[in-house]
Image (tube, grey):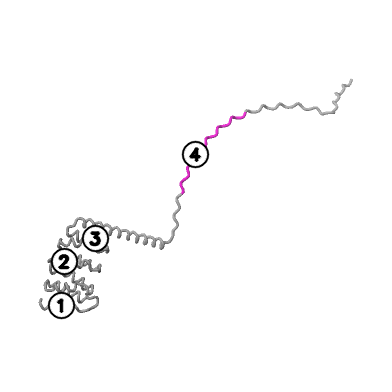
Amino acid sequence: QASAFDTLLDVVDRRSWAEVVAAGAIDGLAALRDERALPHLYARSRYGHPTRVRRAAALAVPKLTADRPAREHLEDMLDDSDPILRIDVVRALSDMGDARSRSALKRRLDVDLDARVRRRIREVLRDLGDKKAQSDAQRDDVDKLQGELAELKARLVKIEARLSDEAPSTPKPSKAAKPSKAAKPSKAAKPSKAAKPSKAAKPKAPQKKVGARPRKKPQKQR
């Protein structure tokens, strides 16, 4: 382990893309569980080193010790200007599990302007036994779920609108005509009374011809 410790110290300050070498060396020092690395971690977690290195050093501290100097060192880092670093410091205090850090976390919660940091602090306070922080963290969870639900609804509306635009327009089937009501049968016409037979006309007497002379009866011969 001694040789591994020395090797990691040799490369902990080596510059590389995204500081992957230095961050990996710090993770290795934490994995050794050798408290001789603590001064090196404290030094590389302070301002002046790359942010990636500082974050790795802060997260490595609780893996080696949970004593008071380590806790106070992390509590001092809560006032750093980098919100991402503050989130990692809060995580490191959570890993340390010391309830005495709640007062420092509450102070930071009251003044921090970053919603992500405040949410993480509430979660840690809940884990450390703070009832108010627990209810606030639950409220944050509900707000987060509501935001995700609203986003899903908005995406669903866009998908439905896109599908309706792409679908061919088909005429809507006309509503079936309602069957007309059967006409009520008309009342049967009452049979008309049979007409009375007219009286037979009397034959008229033959009219005498006007101006015709009456024939003379033939005289009998004597």
- In the image, what residue type sits under mark 1? Leu
Query: Dot 2 lies on which element?
Result: helix
Residue 62 in the image, given as x and y percentages of width and height: 15, 67
Measure how far apart labels 4 and 3 are at the Cα level: 86 Å
Q: Residue at x 19, y 76 (%)?
A: 22
Q: Residue at x 44, y 55 (%)?
A: 172
Measure how far apart labels 2 and 3 are at the Cα level: 19 Å
Q: Dot 2, how many residues are within 10 Å of its Cα: few (below 14), some (14-19), or many (20+)?
A: some
Query: Residue 9: which numbered mark, if any?
Result: 1
Among numbered discs 2 and 4, the one appearing first in the sequence: 2
Q: From the image, state whether disc 3 or disc 1 is nearer to you.
A: 3
Query: Residue 72: which numbered mark, if any?
Result: 2
Q: Are marks 2 and 1 in contact (CB under 8 Å)?
A: no
Q: Residue at x 49, y 39 (%)?
A: 184
**The furthest residue to the left:** 2
Residue receiving disc 3: 110
- Residue 86 vs 133, above or below: the answer is below
Among numbered discs 2 and 3, the one appearing first in the sequence: 2
Query: Dot 3 lies on which element?
Result: helix
Q: Which residues are magenta?
A: 177-195
Seen in the image, is 179 located left or right of residue 213? left
Residue receiving disc 4: 184
Q: Are marks 2 and 4 in contact (CB under 8 Å)?
A: no
Measure how far apart labels 2 and 1 are at the Cα level: 24 Å
